[in-house]
Image (cartoon, rainbow, N blue to C red):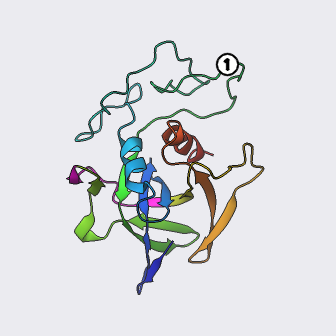
């Protein structure tokens, strides 16, 4: 994860998305799938009681799966089937909102007390690279608090199934949890949504 220092903070190479102001910073090498993963997070179906996000179309060819049970307090996500023999998780808070884009490719990071605040450089605010389509304009979360670094790894990298705790990364003197994710797994957007609520 490369960075450029500024007077007030740093600029990191990565893509940031957020739910209700809680942001995940997607990091990885060029071409690892950061923008693609962000697009799929943004295009997750609207949850009950939450209006669709303007300008973010549903993903073609991804039908909703009927009969998917919900976790207690968490609306079911179409397209994410329950695993046989895996009980519902107690104590998982509700999911009140959808992902929003914070910044793509370059992310401004400033420190505010014990918090790290993410935003987009003005020239690229609200813009997302969609490979094969071009640069598209999307609604944007102007500022969000960094809660998670999602480190993109390739499909062959083993990921601990039940980690006791996340590793951390020091950014401007603040330790941020780091979660490894495989960007092209179907469940990765849902995993990020859950992780941002821990």
Q: Measured from the top left, where is residue 41 in percent x and y?
A: 41, 43
For the point 62% across and 24% down, the residue is 72
On screen, residue 194 versus residue 137, left or right, reads: right
Residue farthest to the front? 156
The mark total stands at 1
Q: In which quarter of the image is residue 126?
A: bottom left
User: Which residue bears the numbered disc 1?
Assistant: 84
Residue pictured at 70% horizontal, 23% vertical: 86
Question: Which residue is at the front of the view, 46 or 3?
Answer: 3
Q: Position of residue 149 (x, y in %)?
A: 56, 60
Q: Which residue lies furthest to the bottom in this view?
A: 7
Start-end of magenta stretch: 133-145
Residue furthest top in the image? 67
Q: Residue at x 29, y 38 (%)?
A: 53
In front: 32, or 54? Answer: 32
In the displayed orientation, state which residue is furthest to the right.
164
Q: How crowded is mark 1: few (under 14 residues within 10 Å), some or many (20 or more)?
A: few
Q: In this view of the protein, which residue sits in the foreground, 57 or 32?
A: 32
Q: Is residue 4 left or right of residue 185?
A: left
Residue 115 magenta-highlighted: no
Above or below for 37 versus 125: above
SS label for mark 1 = loop
- Residue 129 to residue 53: above or below: below
Q: Where is residue 135 in the image (x, y as percent from the top left)?
A: 22, 56
In reply to whether residue 142 is colored magenta, the answer given is yes
Q: Where is residue 148 in the image (x, y as percent from the top left)?
A: 56, 57
């Amino acid at each position: 994860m490369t960075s450029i220092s500024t007077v007030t903070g740093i600029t990191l190479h990565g893509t940031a998305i957020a739910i209700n102001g809680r942001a995940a910073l997607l990091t990885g090498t060029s071409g690892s799938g950061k923008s693609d993963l962000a697009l799929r997070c943004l295009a997750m179906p609207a949850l009950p009681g939450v209006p669709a996000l303007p300008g973010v179309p549903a993903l073609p060819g991804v039908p909703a799966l009927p009969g998917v049970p919900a976790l207690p307090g968490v609306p079911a996500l179409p397209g994410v089937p329950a695993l046989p023999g895996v009980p519902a998780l107690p104590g998982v808070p509700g999911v009140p909102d959808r992902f929003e884009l914070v910044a793509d490719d370059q992310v401004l990071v400033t420190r505010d007390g014990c918090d790290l605040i993410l935003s987009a450089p003005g020239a690229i605010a609200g813009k997302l690279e969609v490979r094969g389509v071009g640069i598209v304009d999307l609604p944007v979360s102007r500022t969000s608090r960094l809660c998670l670094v999602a480190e993109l790894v390739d499909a062959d990298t083993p990921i601990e199934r039940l980690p006791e705790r996340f590793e951390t990364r020091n950014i401007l003197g603040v330790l941020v949890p780091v979660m490894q994710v495989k960007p092209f797994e179907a469940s990765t957007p849902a995993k990020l949504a859950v992780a941002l609520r821990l």
